[in-house]
Amino acid sequence: MRFARILLLWVAVMISVKDISAQLTTSGGQTGWVKLMLQSDARKLLNHMSPMVEVDLPTHRGALNHNQLQGTLAGFFRQYPPKAITIDQQGALNHRNDFFIGTYTSGEQNYRLYIQAEKQDDGHKIFFLSIQPK
């Protein structure tokens, strides 16, 4: 009986660890901005953004500079706190820009995440961010 409890506890821990790592599942090493989104850190996320970013969110749509973007993202994260983010597909738009498609989960609702970003030596700079209900 004790062995069964230990085994059950071990399985539960392994599932939890797998679930946590699934929240950060990305291809191409984009865990930097994914992690900041999961932390709802709008200020630090700006380091991964172009000076002007086109956004398409349930709360706002349009081109924003960093000052506007920080407030908009902070409000979005308050209203739609992230539970999980996965990047399911990525590719090249052209030789300078990549795209990322995934799922942004808030509460029990899944949203389609679509990002376009310019390739830089130190990673990507996001210039288009869309999070819309699936």
Image: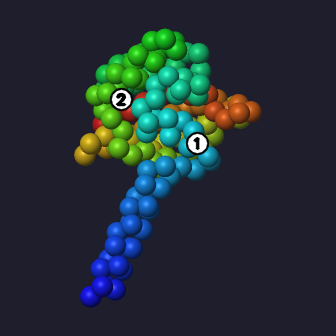
Left or right, residue 9 beside residue 26: left
Seen at 42% across and 32% down, the residue is: 40
Left or right, residue 99 beside residue 9: right
Left or right, residue 96 beside residue 65: right
Assign a secondary structure to mark 2.
Answer: helix
Percent position of residue 72, x then y? 39, 18
Can residue 48 be seen here? The reply is: yes
Nearer the N terminus, badge 2 or badge 1?
1
Percent position of residue 63, x then y? 47, 14
Answer few, some or many: residues within 10 Å of disc 2's Cα (few below 14, many 20 plus, some between 14 and 19).
some
Q: Which residue does the numbered mark 1 point to in the structure image? A: 30
Given contact means CB atoms under 8 Å apart, are the residues at marks 2 and 1 in contact? no
Percent position of residue 84, x then y? 39, 46
Percent position of residue 34, x then y? 50, 40
Front label number (2 vs 1): 2
Q: Which residue does the numbered mark 2 point to in the structure image? A: 77
Seen at 50% across and 40% down, the residue is: 35
Looking at the image, the residue that sits furthest to the front is: 2
- Above-or-below relation of 116 to 2: above
Amino acid beneath label 1: Gln
Seen at 46% across and 17% down, the residue is: 69
Left or right, residue 129 beside residue 5: right
Assign a secondary structure to mark 1.
Answer: loop
Q: Quadrant of residue 98?
A: top right
- Above-or-below relation of 1 to 10: below
Answer few, some or many: residues within 10 Å of disc 1's Cα (few below 14, many 20 plus, some between 14 and 19).
some
Q: Quadrant of residue 99?
A: top right
- Above-or-below relation of 56 to 37: above
Image quarter hosting the C terminus: top left
Seen at 35% across and 44% down, the residue is: 83
Image quarter hosting the N terminus: bottom left
